[in-house]
Image (cartoon, rainbow, N blue to C red):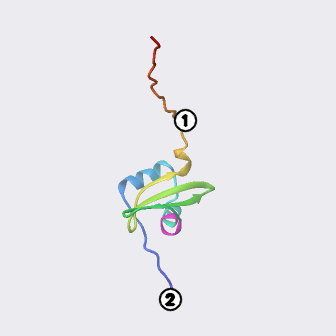
Amino acid sequence: MRMTLMKPVFNGHAVRRIIERRLPIEAVEQIAQVGVTVQENGTRVMKRGDINGKPIHVVLAKPNTVITVYSADEWKTSITVRRKHKHTHAL
């Protein structure tokens, strides 16, 4: 018996991200169906795959609605956290 995979449904946000990032829809669809699950909770699942050697994450609302797509290296950032120090002065 052959197992058939459910084709994912893409919401508007996901479509915009796919177009912005110039990703092939077929590759995103494949990651959504058979990508490696990276994170999962009761309502969402994040899957990882590669497109042309670039790590891609696809986030789905269960069971099969793609809600966003991004390159895994987009989370690398140069933002630093500045802490406010309380200066204590000796009297």
> In the rendered image of this protein, does residue 70 appear above or below residue 49?
above
Q: Which residue is outermost to the bottom?
A: 1
Whole-percent x, y for residue 25 in the image:
49, 60
Disc 1: which residue: 78
Question: What's the mark number on residue 37?
Answer: none
Identified at 51% across, 56% down, the residue is: 57
- In the rendered structure, the answer to whether residue 35 lies left or right of residue 59 reads right
Quadrant where the image shows the C terminus = top left
Upstream in sequence: badge 1 or badge 2: 2
Could you tell me if the residues under marks 1 and 2 are in contact, i.e. CB atoms within 8 Å?
A: no
Identified at 53% across, 60% down, the residue is: 48
Q: Where, by quadrant of the figure, is residue 40 drawn? A: bottom left
How packed is label 1: few (under 14 Cα within 10 Å), some, or many (20 or more)? few
Instruction: Give the CA distance from mark 1 to mark 2.
Output: 50 Å
How packed is label 2: few (under 14 Cα within 10 Å), some, or many (20 or more)? few
Per the rendered image, the range of residues in magenta is: 31-35
Residue depth check, mark 1 versus mark 2: number of the one nearer the observer: 1
Residue 34: say if magenta.
yes
> In the rendered image of this protein, does residue 17 appear above or below residue 47?
above
Whole-percent x, y for residue 66 in the image:
41, 61
At label 2, which amino acid type do we have? Met
Whole-percent x, y for residue 70 in the image:
49, 51
Disc 2, SS: loop
Magenta segment main secondary structure: helix
Question: What's the mark number on residue 1?
Answer: 2
